[in-house]
């Protein structure tokens, strides 16, 4: 009897695990039956974002997320332009004030902005100050964050939990997720591009559609500069997304992550009754 009981319990556990695994492998349901979500993000608050990226996005009716550092010269000199694009539906995201990074990984990091010397209170205060600055520009209370250099530790300790309390979601670096069940909304992977071709950009979103997950781009300079994407390659991607709106749902990082985080709605709740 004991053997039968153990066998029954084992089979029940195997059945439940199989059911759970099957659920995890189901394709994630994106709006409009799209096969993947695509998010276009731009770091550091650069003039080329206003002069090149935004006009191209507007041309194709797409929206971008712009992670601006508080000490960006463009943000200071062209505040009204940044305010205008925010009113037009583009997102302004938090990218700290001074863009601190891990000085052990990057030799260009100056000592005062080395995350290895930051305290937890210091990074929290800097993120709060950047939120306050951005609120003065676009008037919004809620914000998303992009880890600078994809670094998430201050003095060797993770500050991801601090980010969870301050932001709707956060972008990091990493490969396209295999499934949406493995995506941490406060540690979302993205591709930091550098001199890609338009075909490579398109291939990236096609890989996301194969997995029914999401492709997040981390752009910096557009049309010339550091970690650059050429104006031609950038527009090739936007044109492709515009032509395949039935396949890819493109939105700001805030929009997409709000959707990802929303509670699942039972099927019966959406059934129409006359």
Image (cartoon, rainbow, N blue to C red):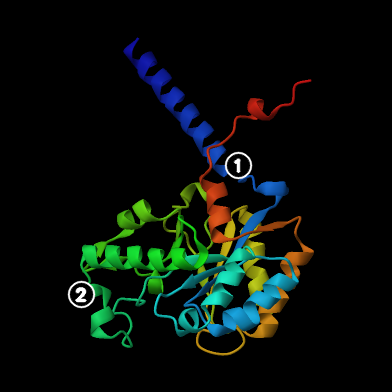
Q: Residue furthest top?
A: 1
Residue 171, visible in the rendered structure: no
Quarter of the image for residue 48 reads: bottom right
Q: How many numbered discs?
A: 2
Q: Give SS at disc 1.
A: loop
* Observer-nearest of 167 and 87: 87
Q: Are marks 2 and 1 in contact (CB under 8 Å)?
A: no
Quarter of the image for residue 103 reads: bottom left
* Observer-nearest of 106 and 67: 67
Kindly identify which residue carries mark 2. 117
Which residue appears at 57% of the width and 43% of the height?
A: 25
Which residue appears at 47% of the width and 52% of the height?
A: 183
Q: Say which quadrant the C terminus sits in.
A: top right
Q: Does label 2 or label 1 sit earlier along the sequence?
A: 1
Circle 2 crowding by C-alpha within 10 Å: few under 14, some 14–19, many from 20 = some
Residue 135, visible in the rendered structure: yes
């Amino acid at each position: 009897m004991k053997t039968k009981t153990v066998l029954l319990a084992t089979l029940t556990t195997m059945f439940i695990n199989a059911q759970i695994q099957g659920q995890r492998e189901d394709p994630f349901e994106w709006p409009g039956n799209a096969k993947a979500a695509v998010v276009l993000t731009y770091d550091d608050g650069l003039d080329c974002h206003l002069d090149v990226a935004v006009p191209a996005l507007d041309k194709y009716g797409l929206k971008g997320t712009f992670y601006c550092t508080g000490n960006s010269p463009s943000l200071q000199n062209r505040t009204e332009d940044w305010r205008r694009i925010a009113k037009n539906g583009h997102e302004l995201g938090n990218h700290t004030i001074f863009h601190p990074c891990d000085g052990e990984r990057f030799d260009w990091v100056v000592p005062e902005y080395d995350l290895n010397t930051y305290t937890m209170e210091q990074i929290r205060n800097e993120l709060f100050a950047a939120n306050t600055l951005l609120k003065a520009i676009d008037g919004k209370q809620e914000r998303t964050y992009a880890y600078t250099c994809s670094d998430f530790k201050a003095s060797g300790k993770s500050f991801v939990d601090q980010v969870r309390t301050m932001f709707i979601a956060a972008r990091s670096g990493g490969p396209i997720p295999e499934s949406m069940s493995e995506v941490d909304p406060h540690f979302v992977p993205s591709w930091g591009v550098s001199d890609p071709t338009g075909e490579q950009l398109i291939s990236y979103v096609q890989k996301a559609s194969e997995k029914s997950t999401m492709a997040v781009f981390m752009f910096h300079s557009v049309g010339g500069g550091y970690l650059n994407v050429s104006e031609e390659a950038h527009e090739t991607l936007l044109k492709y997304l515009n032509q395949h709106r039935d396949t890819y749902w493109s939105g700001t990082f805030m929009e997409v992550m709000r959707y990802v985080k929303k509670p699942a709605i039972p099927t019966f709740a959406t059934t129409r009754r006359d």
